[in-house]
């Protein structure tokens, strides 16, 4: 199941949990008995995490639910459960209407960021060859994601340079940046193929600094990733 489908199912499951409680405790347009506090907190907390993942922390859905969670009068008051459900329903409608940021790509970017952070940590430990090899894998995966977003086809088994050529032809970036990608791909190959003496500390650190900028500009914040 694709990530976006899993997120959609989680939204629907939380709303189904709410509906089950509503059938038990809601009559004539109001709560005749408050639903269990632990269920209120669970649905709200899971909903907050789900909206953060799918909509982002800057979305109005996330901000509304967070305000509810932080309000002293509402944090443990299960009578606000129907408000939580309303926020979840609104977020799901926007999600299904393609009004939100491309969730799958954003989550993939977060995964890449984790790997990039690991590469930076390796460099801090002076393990420059390992840092460069891992950084190269992040670069290749980033280029794959950029091709996927643009509907560009490529062989399942490929490497940085063919992806680089595809993206330049698709005007994803210019030839100057293409040359930079090619140079860093060469450094990655040196790390992967045992030419360790050619992977210097300076080159490795410069590569990782450049890579973080590249990932941010072309996978996270690129206009091409907007709906």
Image (tube, rainbow, N blue to C red):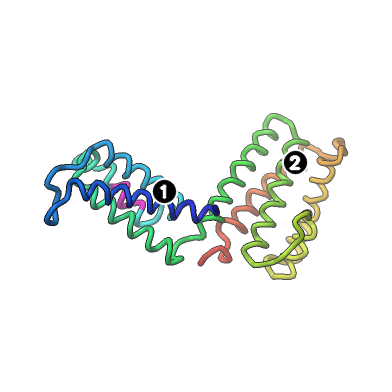
Q: Position of residue 196 (x, y in %)?
A: 85, 36
Which span of residues is magenta-colored? Answer: 62-67
Report helix, strand or loop for mark 2: helix
The residue located at (26%, 46%) in the rendering is 68
Residue 63 falls within the magenta-colored stretch:
yes
Which disc, if any, is residue 222? none
Q: Quadrant of residue 156?
A: bottom right
- Nearer to the camera, 3 or 151: 3
Which disc, if any, is residue 50? 1
The residue located at (29%, 52%) in the rendering is 85
Q: Position of residue 33 (x, y in %)?
A: 14, 43
The residue located at (69%, 66%) in the rendering is 152
- Nearer to the camera, 91 or 172: 91
- Nearer to the camera, 162 or 208: 162
Report helix, strand or loop for mark 1: helix
Say whether disc 2 or disc 1 marks the residue closer to the N-terminus. Answer: 1
Q: Residue furthest bottom?
A: 170
Which disc, if any, is residue 132? 2
Residue 22 falls within the magenta-colored stretch:
no
Q: Position of residue 201 (x, y in %)?
A: 77, 37
The residue located at (75%, 36%) in the rendering is 130
Other residues around mark 2 within 10 Å, as few (<14) / some (14–19) / many (≥20): many
Q: Position of residue 140 (x, y in %)?
A: 72, 52
- Say left or right for 135 vs 10: right
Q: Quadrant of residue 127?
A: top right
What main secondary structure does the magenta stretch of the protein show? helix
Other residues around mark 1 within 10 Å, as few (<14) / some (14–19) / many (≥20): many
Q: Residue furthest top?
A: 125
């Amino acid at each position: 199941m694709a990530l976006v489908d899993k997120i959609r199912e989680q939204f629907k499951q939380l709303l189904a949990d709410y509906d089950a409680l509503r059938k038990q405790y809601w009559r004539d347009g109001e709560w005749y008995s408050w639903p269990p506090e632990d269920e209120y907190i669970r649905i709200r907390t899971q909903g907050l995490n789900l909206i953060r993942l799918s909509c982002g922390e800057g979305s109005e859905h996330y901000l509304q639910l967070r305000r509810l969670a932080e309000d002293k009068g509402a944090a443990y008051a299960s009578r606000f459960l129907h408000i939580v459900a309303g926020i979840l329903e609104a977020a799901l409608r926007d999600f299904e209407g393609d009004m939100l940021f491309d969730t799958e790509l954003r989550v993939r970017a977060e995964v890449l960021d984790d790997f990039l952070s690991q590469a930076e940590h390796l460099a801090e430990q002076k393990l420059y060859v390992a840092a460069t090899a891992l950084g190269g894998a992040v670069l290749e995966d980033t280029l794959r994601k950029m091709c996927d977003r643009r509907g560009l086809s490529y062989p399942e088994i490929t490497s940085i340079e063919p992806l680089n050529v595809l993206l330049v032809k698709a005007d994803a970036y210019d030839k100057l940046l293409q040359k930079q990608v090619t140079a860093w791909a060469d450094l990655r190959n040196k790390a992967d193929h045992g030419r360790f003496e050619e992977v210097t500390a300076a080159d490795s650190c410069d590569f990782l600094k450049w890579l973080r900028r590249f990932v941010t500009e072309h996978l996270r914040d690129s206009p091409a990733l907007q709906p």
